[in-house]
Amino acid sequence: MKKTFSKMDKTLLFITIVFFLFGLLMILSASSMESYMRYETSPYYYFYRQAIFLALGLIVSLIIIKIPTKIYKGFSYLLLLGILVCLGGLTAYGYAANNAVSWFKIGPLNIQPSEFAKIIVIIYLACYYDRKKDELNNTWQLIKPIIPVIIIFGLVLIQPDFGTAIVIALICFFMFFALPMSKLCRLKFTSLVIVLFISIIGVFFITKGSFLKAYQLERFNFKDPCLRYKEDSGYQLCNSFIAFKNGDLTGQGIGRSTQKFLYLPESYTDFIFPIIVEEWGLIIGIIIILLYLVIIYKVYVIAKKATNLQASLLAYGVCIYIFLHVAINLIGVMGIGPLTGVPLPFLSYGGSYTINLFISLAIAQRVAIESNKQRKKKNKS
């Protein structure tokens, strides 16, 4: 294990450990009042559960970090088939919560397959394109693997989980720009995506979003939330703004948030960042955003230094995944864009999401380990 640790990205490892521990502390602070006042249970309920998720995530990541990435090719299709079956099974056996049938309830645990779909899509695309690396100028070979991803997108969308579906679609889209294809092929693909995007926007405006649920349409109305305080989207965003304002530069102090007293619903999940700013201040909020940029950059560097296409795409996929979660969550809670229910990496409460994040980071670290091994071998020879 010492040899493995020596080849890991230490900066990435240190920052992620600090983030996970800080997130655990903030989940305790943000959830204590809601768990006690609304659910009449222990103030430590979500803290204990998140601690268990972190322990499970750590165990899984320690296993994954020892598995060579070349082995992924052997079971990438099996993972894809498994996630398709799980997502399809939700229609018959799924557990409903927060207006979506996105979970399997197994005893005290709620497992959300769509969270694991994100890393499975990354593994599947990385393995597929590595197999076809000599045929990447063939338009059909480029587009073919998108078919099962579109099915996954559709199965997640009908739950309905618009935020997760968008993240999966964007992961697939941005991974294309890491492929070594010709300029002509890249231009064709980009043109196709632009046409599809314009078509979707056109359908949305023509139908006035009739294919979306009423509460989903409300999320697109994110302007002037405090003038719509009695509406769900206005209520959440307005209380988010109040939390930011209360925090000022230096914050109210740890545990002294007022918005967590049932004003900001489920403040320990998607809206944990406003609670952090309220308690720690805008300065710490900016530092957190900067640390996110460091994490994203470090994973990007791992992708750039990877010694083969599959490893590079795996790390690029993880980089895109983390970036999308940070960007979409912060855009939503700051009222810059629609709310999507996408959790904030390391800091938001969630079991499936936390374990999947551990898996993703372990894969990125495994790519870094393999790259360092290859460079050492070249230096010796």
Image (tube, grey):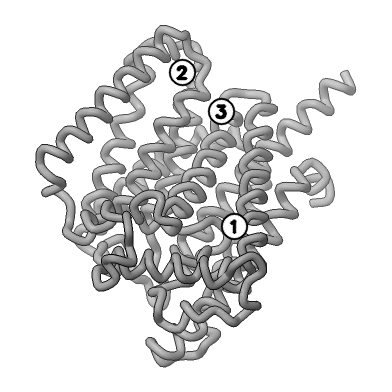
Q: Which residue is mark 2?
A: 132
- Element type where label 2 sits in the image: loop
Residue 35 sits in quarter: bottom left
The label shown at residue 60 is 1
Q: Secondary structure at mark 1?
A: helix
* Residue 314 - label: none
Q: Are marks 3 and 2 in contact (CB under 8 Å)?
A: no
Of marks 3 and 1, which one's residue comes earlier in the chain? 1
Q: Residue at x 67, y 69 (%)?
A: 250
Number of numbered markers: 3
Q: Which residue is mark 3?
A: 310
How many neighbours does mark 3 have within 10 angstroms: few (below 14), some (14-19), or many (20 or more)? Answer: many
Label 3 secondary element: helix
Residue drawn at 15 percent across, 39 percent down = 205
Q: Is residue 232 above or below residue 87?
A: below
The correct choice, above or below, for 319 with respect to 309 in the image is: below
Work out whether residue 59 can be spotted: no
Residue at x 42% of width, y 10% of height? 137
* Sequence-wise first label, 3 or 2: 2
